[in-house]
Amino acid sequence: MQQMSNVGGKNMIIKKVKIYGFGRHKDKEWEFADGLNVIYGENETGKSTIFAFIRAMFYGLTGRGTDNYRKKYFPWNFVKGTDKFGGELEFSYKGVEYRAIS
């Protein structure tokens, strides 16, 4: 994780999600505006997968037992050598901006 800059604020704010490959999402990016942002869509379009990606960027993925999230969220239609598993998360916390890359 790298520190990017110092900006005002005390809360954690997610600014950008960029997914190289995670579950159904491949090469997708979402930027969030200040204030409340809502992710919505039809069933089975990947809304929970976006949340799982954000959680994985902060806490990692388990690869053991019945909760094998590495297997569950491995990119669909993955092509070895050309596709990537992971992405980037840009956020600010206590006025400092960060970028986590996986």
Image (cartoon, rainbow, N blue to C red):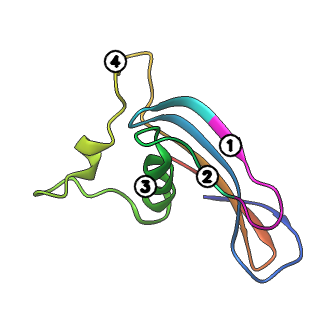
Q: Secondary structure at mark 3?
A: helix
Q: CA distance from mark 4 to mark 3?
A: 23 Å
Instruction: Name the side, left or right, on which 26 lies relative to 9.
Output: left
Depth order, front residue of 79/46? 46
Q: Is residue 80 above or below residue 15?
A: above
Badge 2: residue crowd in 10 Å (few <14, some 14–19, many ≥20): few
Point out residue 59 in the picture as x, y percentages from the top left corner: 42, 66
Question: Which mark sits nearer the N-terminus, 1 or 3?
Answer: 1
For residue 52, which numbered disc appears in the image?
3
Q: Could you tell me how far apart the alpha carbons at marks 1 and 2 are, in whole angstroms? A: 10 Å
Seen from the viewer's position, the closer of residues 25 and 44 is 44
Q: What SS does tag 1 mark?
A: strand
Q: What amino acid type should be assigned to the residue bearing mark 2?
A: Ile
**Is residue 18 rendered magenta in the image?**
no
Q: In the image, which disc is placed on residue 30?
A: 1
Foreground mark, 2 or 3, reads 2
| Residue range (magenta) | 29-37
Q: Which residue is mark 4?
A: 80
Tell me residue 94's x, y (percent). Answer: 76, 80
